Amino acid sequence: MRDEIPQEASTSGFEGAAELFGVLSTPIRLRIIGALCGGEKNVSQLLQDITVSQPNMSQHLNVLYRAGVVAKRRSGVQVFYRIGDESVVRVCKAVCSQISLGREVDQVDHGRREPERVIQAKR
């Protein structure tokens, strides 16, 4: 049996989840979060990890910052970013793990069904 989401959490919880998933809806933002899991980085360091233009990186960082997902600090002309909300990291890890697990299960299921098709075709 699947766990149900309590009805009292539905309105505010669903709205908050939809807002968060909207912020996390691009692979680049997920990669930024992944890169920052190792610690604080400036834009140049993030650009070494993630191949996008500097303006594109800044735009995505701004979205994550405004949502509270990342925090930043200035040091001279450099801006350093870090994870601002650890709960977002847990959500990302949980979702990515489930997707990975689902794909593995699909591959196993597909592998089991293939021999059945071959046997049926020979009959």
Image (cartoon, grey):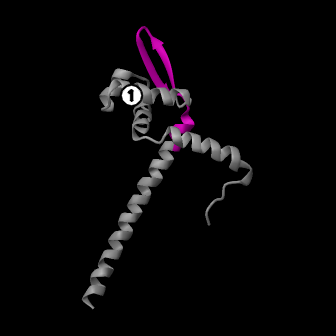
Nearer to me, 101 or 30? 30
Q: Would you say residue 21 sits in the magenta stretch?
A: no
Give the residue at the far top of this rendering. Answer: 76
Q: Position of residue 12 (x, y in %)?
A: 69, 43
Give the residue at the far bottom of this rendering. Answer: 123
- Residue found 64% across the figure and 59% down from its top: 3
The magenta segment is 71-91
Relative to residue 62, is residue 8 drawn left or right?
right
Location of residue 29 (image quadrant): top left
**In terms of secondary structure, where does tag 1 sit?**
helix
Position above or below: 123 against 79: below
Amino acid under label 1?
A: Met
Relative to residue 59, is residue 11 drawn left or right?
right
Q: Position of residue 33 (x, y in %)?
A: 44, 34
Location of residue 54 (image quadrant): top left
- Residue found 66% across the figure and 45% down from its top: 13
Nearer to me, 5 or 62? 62
- Residue found 54% across the figure and 34% down from its top: 86
Count of numbered circles on the image: 1
Quarter of the image with the N terminus in it: bottom right
- Residue found 57% across the figure and 37% down from its top: 87
Quarter of the image with the C terminus in it: bottom left
Q: Tell me the residue that label 1 is attached to.
A: 57
Q: Position of residue 58 (x, y in %)?
A: 41, 25
Give the residue at the far left of this rendering. Answer: 122
